[in-house]
Image (tube, coloured by chain):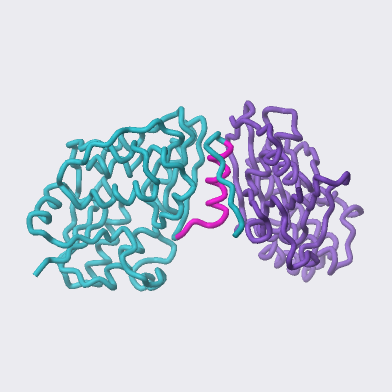
Chain colours: A purple, B cyan
Amino acid sequence: MLLADFGTTYCKLLDTERDEKPHIIASRDLPSDFLADLGTGHNAVRRSKRAMNELSALARGGCRLIADKNFVLLDCGSRDLKFVRFAGGKVVDMGWNAECGASMGFTIELLATYYELDYSTMAVPTSGFSITCGVLGMSHIFDAVVQGSSEEEAVARFVRGIALNAHRFAGAPEELYLSGGLCANPLFVACLPCKVHLLGRFVLLEGLQDLMSAKLVKYP
Amino acid sequence: MQERVGIVGVPPLSAIAELNRQEALIFDLDEPQVRAPIDQSATWAPRVYCAILRTVVLNCMHLQLDRIFIDVGPGKCDAALYIAEALEGMLTIPIHRTRNEDQTAFGFPLCTTAMPLEEKIAQITRSVQRASPHQVRPACAPLCGFWGVPPRDFALLRSFPEQTHVFGWTRCMENKTPANLDLEKQFNPDLPTVFFTQSFCAKAALAQHLGRQHPQALVIDCDVSPSNSARAKIEAFLELSGVPISVTTAT
């Protein structure tokens, strides 16, 4: 069975009938006639025989990967933020921010390309910009550079602002499980003001596997 | 000639009974009655405002009404009080401001019966236009709860199962006691419940307060129409709460 997490900029794919790990393909490189058996994400309804909504996939995937009964799982993707909070093994809160938290991951990637930055070598700034979305936040970078900051320092403060905003969106937990593309960004992870467990980019695929399997997780 | 009367909120039973006797044609102005962009209402009401009251204004701009009953008391909201002023300025017809504090309970059989939620709430809103007692209906064993007002866009209700029990002001509407805060505050803690308000509505404070008390709640607000993320939150909440899974199939 072909499973797909159709992210805005990257698709995560898993063929369960092949002995292989999930792999990533840029969404722009996906063949126009590509059709998954079961999908989630922005294009899932159009590109899948069956589609599952992303919050459900995130929660199910989190349950498969996290042993704790009490946790907050935050997914930071190219376009939006999603979180689920479990208490005693039950979902007690969730959120999906596709508007005010828009385009954070995508903007962070664009900035690295444009300014030729390597997030793994950048220092964590002591303060961040007060921003709520990637697009509007870019003005702060331009202003800071005009006022004499280095491009690297300005982008780092931008990333810190994004991280603080994401943390607040998830309810400001002391401990956080993180999924999505920003798991691979060391600066972003270091800017989160809490203990962070990285789950990587395939948590939603785990959720699809959970739905696919006969042993459906019982909620609550 | 049949009189065309618009109503906003739930006017007192005495007013509805009188309109029924006169066989007036009643328009529920809280619901979309015309096909027109809601931004047209911006001439008379702010864009950042309750979408239901913006709909009231839009309806009044297009419907040729003879008069309007608008409830402005504790059974509706302060915003309606001010919209009544705007209607007075934009129309030349009589605007009757009412304060419905009726306490005679008519019951809420629709709220607890099995029926698609869109249809259930549509029937509840239509019942406001009648002064007659409700038809008896069997209550169903509920799977989940919906607390709140009838949404401006009923598309919000599509993910819910037929066995959804309705609470909040919608229940007060069917009971014909829109100012009954005690009834409005009721919920069933054993049912996963979506607490809904329109964006920019004062009832959001009550929804948040009750949602905090409820062990399994989703508090949500929507403006004109539900966004994809709002719909997804409801679907995920219901599914993860044990309500039957809804999986979309591609065509």
Nearest the viewer among B12 and A116 is: B12
**Compared with residue A65, is residue B29 higher up or lower down, i.e. above or below?**
below
Per the picture, the main secondary structure of the magenta-coloured stretch is: helix
Residue B89 appears in view: yes
Quarter of the rendering occupied by the C terminus of chain A: top right
* Rendered location of residue A97, percent (x, y): 61, 53
- Which of A61 and B207 lies nearest the eye of the viewer? A61
Say left or right for A45 vs B147. Answer: right
Q: Quadrant of residue B94?
A: bottom left
From what the image shows, is residue A45 above or below residue A143?
Answer: above
Which residue is depicted at the point 17% across and 37% down? B104
Q: Position of residue A49 (x, y in %)?
A: 66, 54
Start-end of magenta stretch = B225-240
Q: Is residue B227 magenta?
A: yes
Residue at 21% x, 40% y: name it.
B135
> Could you tell whether A108 is left or right of B214 in the image?
right
Q: Residue at x 27, y 68 (%)?
A: B60
Locate residue A96, reporting x and y percent.
61, 50
Does residue A131 show up?
A: no
**Image check: A121 left or right of B36?**
right
Q: How many marks?
A: 0
For residue B77: magenta?
A: no
Figure check: B6 above or below A60: below
Spot occupied by residue B30 in the image (x, y as percentages of width and height): 31, 58
